[in-house]
């Protein structure tokens, strides 16, 4: 796996802290920093997601992928899955995630709650490399709602 991240924010541009990441699979992700009122030359222009937001989004994508795949492999009629991630970060650098709560909303026809609970646990204990890595610095908790669809 590879990724090339390039700074796009040369002096005189709207964002001094913009970056473009090109993934090994050929996709592009843009990132930017938050505006810095005290030192505008050090801040971004709020034109894209923050780098740490992309870490969080990737983690959500990784675990949601696992949950859907595990449910499908269990022959459950899963029709929807989303996960909302709420975090706390350390107050000082490096401002790592210290707490992450993931709330899943799974919809389907006749899916037992135990199957959803098991799929989430399997993702976090075995399959989701992103959440397993973040679990080294953050206390990760989960919850879910199961909707009949």
Image (cartoon, grey):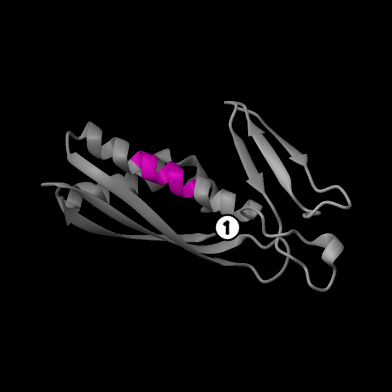
Q: How far from the left and from the top, in percent, is residue 25?
A: 57, 26
Q: What element carries label 1?
A: loop
In the figure, is residue 123 to the left or right of 55? Answer: left
Residue placed most toward the observer, 78 or 141: 78
Q: Does the magenta stretch include residue 60?
A: yes
Quarter of the figure with residue 127: top left
Compared with 44, 71 (above or below) is above
Residue at (64%, 55%) from the top-left corner?
50
Residue placed most toward the observer, 31 or 63: 31
Q: Is residue 33 magenta?
A: no
Residue at (41%, 58%) from the top-left corner?
84
Residue positioned most to the right: 11
What's the magenta bit mostly, secondary-structure-wise? helix
Residue at (71%, 69%) from the top-left corner?
92
Instruction: Name the residue beneath numbered marker 1.
Output: 137
Compared with 115, 104 (above or below) is below
Residue placed most toward the observer, 138 or 11: 11
Compared with 82, 87 (above or below) is below
Q: How many labels does the image show?
A: 1
Residue at (61%, 53%) from the top-left corner?
49
In the picture, the quarter occupied by the N terminus is top right
Quarter of the figure with residue 23: top right
Q: How far from the left and from the top, in percent, is residue 131?
A: 48, 48
Which residues are drawn in magenta? 59-66
In the figure, is residue 77 to the left or right of 60? Answer: left
Quarter of the figure with residue 98: bottom right
In the figure, is residue 119 to the left or right of 65? Answer: left
Q: How far from the left and from the top, in percent, is residue 73?
A: 24, 32
Q: How far from the left and from the top, in percent, is residue 51?
A: 65, 51
Q: Is the residue marked by circle 1 packed among few (<14), some (14-19), or many (20+) residues within 10 Å?
A: some
């Amino acid at each position: 796996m590879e990724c090339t991240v390039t700074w796009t924010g040369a002096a005189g541009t709207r964002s001094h802290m913009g970056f473009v990441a090109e993934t090994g699979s050929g996709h592009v992700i843009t990132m930017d920093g938050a505006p810095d009122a005290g030192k505008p030359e050090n801040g971004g222009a709020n034109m894209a997601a923050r780098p740490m937001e992309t870490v969080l989004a990737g983690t959500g994508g990784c675990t949601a992928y696992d949950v859907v795949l595990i449910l499908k492999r269990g022959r459950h009629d899963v029709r929807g899955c989303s996960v909302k991630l709420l975090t706390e970060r350390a107050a000082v650098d490096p401002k790592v995630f210290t707490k992450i709560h993931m709330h899943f909303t799974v919809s389907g026809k006749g899916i037992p709650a135990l199957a959803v609970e098991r799929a989430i646990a399997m993702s976090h204990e075995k399959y989701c490399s992103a959440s397993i890595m973040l679990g080294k610095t953050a206390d990760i908790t989960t919850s879910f709602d199961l909707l009949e669809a």
